[in-house]
DNA sequence: GCCAACGTTGGC
DNA sequence: GCCAACGTTGGC
């Protein structure tokens, strides 16, 4: 079982949207590194944090699960299907994440990291899961 | 709205 | 294959 983090702007697609539709093809990723993750690495059952980006309070707001592994979206680009799992009662903001020592290596915090699909280690996942539960 | 950091494009 | 110009991301 692997863990990931998916970024989404809330105006484009929010965790509430995902809760409504339940399952959503995660499309529109146009970056080769992210494409490779979608195509090669994400497996059914993997869990993904839902990250709200480009807004007043960027935060990890919920959790979803891969229910269909990588398939062609269009042309050379790939997507996966994700299913709503939960919306955290207590979301964890970027600001909070930055303060947690054991999370300082998270890809999310690395300078200039714009990757919209990124890996999360099981330790990072456990740390965050404990906070938001 | 600004701007730093990246990625991509295209001329040479 | 280099690199300048441009576009995008995303925090602030």
Image (tube, coloured by chain):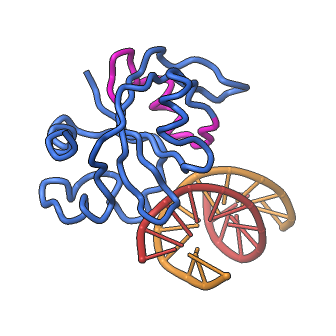
Chain colours: A blue, B orange, C red
- Residue A28 image position (x, y, % from top left): 64, 37
Q: How many marks?
A: 0
Q: Is residue A36 magenta?
A: yes
- Residue A77 image position (x, y, % from top left): 64, 29
Say which of A60 and B2 sits in front: A60
Quarter containing the C terminus of chain A: top left
Q: Is residue A52 left or right of residue A96?
A: right
Say which of A94 and A86 sits in front: A86
Relative to A129, does residue A26 appear above or below in the rendering?
above
Quarter containing the N terminus of chain A: top left
Q: Is residue A24 magenta?
A: no
Q: Which residues are magenta?
A: A28-47
Say which of A33 and A126 sits in front: A126
Residue at (38% x, 18% y) in the render: A43
Residue A73 seen from this side = yes
Say which of A71 and A92 sits in front: A92
Q: Is residue A50 left or right of residue A88?
A: right
- Residue A33 image position (x, y, % from top left): 49, 40
Residue at (14% x, 41% y) in the render: A130
Residue at (29% x, 32% y) in the render: A3
Relative to A24, does residue A14 appear above or below in the rendering?
below
- Residue A99 image position (x, y, % from top left): 19, 65
Residue at (28% x, 26% y) in the render: A2
Residue A81 seen from this side = no
Q: Is residue A39 left or right of residue A93?
A: right
Relative to A98, does residue A65 appear above or below in the rendering?
above
Q: Where, by quadrant of the figure, is residue A128 drawn?
A: top left
């Amino acid at each position: 079982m692997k863990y990931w983090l998916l970024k989404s702007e809330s105006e484009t697609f929010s965790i509430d949207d995902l809760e409504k539709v339940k399952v959503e093809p995660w499309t529109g990723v146009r970056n080769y590194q992210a494409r490779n993750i979608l195509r090669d690495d994400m497996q059914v059952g993997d869990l993904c944090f839902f990250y709200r980006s480009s807004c007043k309070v960027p935060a990890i707001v919920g959790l979803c699960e891969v229910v269909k592994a990588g398939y062609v979206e269009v042309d050379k680009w790939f997507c996966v299907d994700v299913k709503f799992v939960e919306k955290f009662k207590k979301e964890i903001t970027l600001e909070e994440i930055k303060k947690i020592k054991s999370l300082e290596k998270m890809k999310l915090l690395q300078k200039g990291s714009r990757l919209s699909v990124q890996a999360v280690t099981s330790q990072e996942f456990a740390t965050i899961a404990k906070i938001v539960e």
